[in-house]
Image (tube, rainbow, N blue to C red):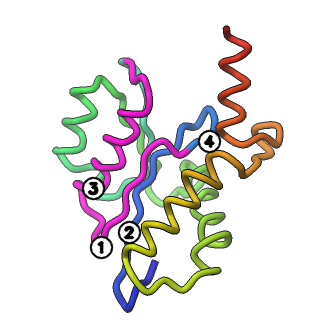
Amino acid sequence: MDVDGEWMHLAVILDLFSRQIVGWAVDETMTTELILEAFNMAVARRNVTPGLILHSDRGVQYRSGEYQQVLQEQEITPSMSRKGNCWDNAVMESFFSRLKVELIYAEEYTSRSAVYSGLFEYIEVFYNRIRRHSSLGYKSPAQFEENYYAQCA
């Protein structure tokens, strides 16, 4: 995202089961700290148990020793896309494609706070709670999870 000639970077963690965005962070630079912020949000929102697989692309931030150490401490198994193969990360590629069409291209942001507010509204209100997904039987991620846990009770 471009804000007054400055790029803003978004790190996102998506729960593949429900397509819900469980962690996200935005900043001026794509750093290990940025992805750890998104990771910490995701861990705070989910009951993470040993053996969880966390998939990412091959960005240097995801390969950093600091990030890999955090995954190891949480007993999370890292998974990475094959070099140059966007199909390995197709669900995230789809999310970013929809984000661009439904939010980014439709707005002209003039401040970082406006970017954050727009992303919050899109992810937390629209995408997770309202936007229907064909892969979820045309339910929103929140509705899909609610239905699943109601059936388990």
Q: What residue is at 50 percent from the left and 64 percent from the top?
A: 119
For marks 2 and 4, the one nearer the N-term is: 2
Q: Which residue is mark 3?
A: 61
Q: Position of residue 45 (x, y in %)?
A: 43, 33
Tell me whether circle 2 and circle 4 mark residues in contact (CB < 8 Å): no
Q: Which residue is mark 1?
A: 28
Above or below, 103 against 74 in this view is: below
| Local SS, label 3 | helix
Q: Which residue is mark 4?
A: 19
Camera-near label (2 vs 3) is 2
Above or below, 142 against 86 in this view is: above
| Local SS, label 2 | strand
Number of the label disc, if any, that sits on residue 1: none
Q: Is residue 82 left or right of residue 133?
A: left
> In the image, what residue type sits under mark 2?
His
Q: CA distance from mark 2 to mark 4?
A: 21 Å
Above or below, 115 against 141 in this view is: below
For marks 1 and 2, the one nearer the N-term is: 2
Q: Which residue is mark 2?
A: 9
For marks 1 and 4, the one nearer the N-term is: 4
Camera-near label (4 vs 3) is 4
> In the image, what residue type sits under mark 1?
Glu
Q: Position of residue 93 (x, y in %)?
A: 58, 58
Q: Position of residue 75 (x, y in %)?
A: 29, 23
Q: Over which residues does the magenta segment extend?
A: 21-49
For marks 2 and 3, the one nearer the N-term is: 2
